[in-house]
Image (cartoon, rainbow, N blue to C red):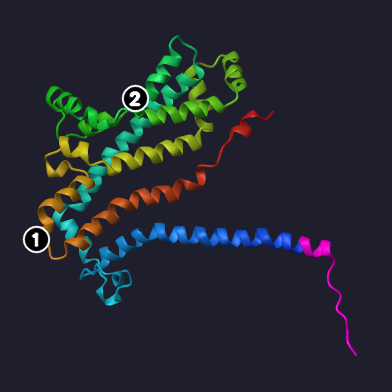
Amino acid sequence: MTTDIAAPPTGERSATEHSARPRTRSIGSRIALLIGALAFLFPFYYMIIGSLQKEPDASPSGAFPDPSNLSLHNYAAIDSAISLGRSLVNSGIFTGGVIICTTVFGLLAGYALARLHFRGRGSTFALVLLVQVVPFQLLLIPLYVLIVRDYGLADSYLGMILPFAINTSAVFIFRQFFLQLPAAMFEAARIDGAGELQILFRIALPLCKPALMSVVLLSFTGPWNEFLWPFLVTKDQDMQPLAVSLANYISTVASAAANPFGAILAGACVLAAPAVALYLLFQSRFNSTDIDSATKG
């Protein structure tokens, strides 16, 4: 006796196959993203492992070292060679000054270009965009002559900060964000008698947290990793940021060190850690906005 198993209807079978295809594509996309993420993170992993190795191993097997070969000796070596703490303080002061100047000037200029009506506003914004295409290297010689010879600001924090005090990218980011805010908010505030600075700091500023976080992160990465300009204006080792100190270590001290490879990687880890920590701390706030709550009611 045979039992016939009825085949599913054609429409039901096609619907099942159709629903399985997006699931398969989703799994494939996740696998591809995972492979890309691992490939992107591997250099950072290798940098950390190399900074912890007592005996350097540049072969592929060095990515999976013996635990007995791991220690913090390289961090102590780089600290004793370049005064790691002092270099970090210099980098922090340099970067913090640039962030404050960039944020304040960018906020004021961005608001003026977005919400104030004055003659030449379009030409001013076009000039801001034009400045972005001028390479900083073209300005090095006149800036060096102006700041070092004329102003006498060599080996000073102010001399390092001044060329980066105004960032046209920050001006552009704030302007574009303020243009997205409803014009009715600003008109209502003006009718109530609020001045432009009151409107900026009491209404516009609390709403621009995503733009503010973007500017802070972008302003941090540039000066924190900047090498060329601080190298030119600082000859005193006690005033040099970490990036310059590491470069001097590579060119002068590394050849005589017991494990220069590990010490350089240890310094690179210290240099990269604040930028990574800042991104992880603020990355959840880039998508947040309070525009809807400000326009209700």
Asked if residue 11 lies left or right of residue 156, the reply is right
Badge 1 marks a residue whose secondary structure is helix
Q: Nearer the viewer, mark 1 or mark 2?
A: 2
Disc 1 residue type (three-letter): Ala
**Which residue position is annotated with label 1?**
256
Helix, strand or loop: magenta stretch = loop
Q: Residue at x 35, y 62 (%)?
A: 45
Q: Is residue 69 magenta?
A: no
Dot 2: few (<14), some (14–19), or many (≥20) neighbours within 10 Å? Answer: some
Residue 182 lies, in percent from the top left, at: 60, 24
Asked if residue 202 lies left or right of residue 255, the reply is right
Report the magenta residues as a range: 1-15
Q: Is residue 13 magenta?
A: yes
Q: Where is the N terminus found, in terms of image quarters?
A: bottom right
Q: Residue at x 26, y 38 (%)?
A: 94
Q: Is residue 214 above or below residue 203?
A: below
| Closer to us: 210 or 24 | 24
Q: Residue at x 18, y 49 (%)?
A: 247
Q: Is residue 289 above or below residue 128?
A: below
Q: Residue at x 11, y 39 (%)?
A: 235
User: Farthest residue in the bottom direction?
Assistant: 1
| Closer to us: 29 or 169 | 29
**Which residue position is annotated with label 2?**
131
Q: Earlier in the sequence, mark 1 or mark 2?
A: 2
Badge 2 marks a residue whose secondary structure is helix
Q: Where is the C terminus found, in terms of image quarters?
A: top right
Answer whether labels 1 and 2 touch (C-beta < 8 Å).
no
Q: Is residue 175 above or below residue 59?
A: above
Disc 2 residue type (three-letter): Val
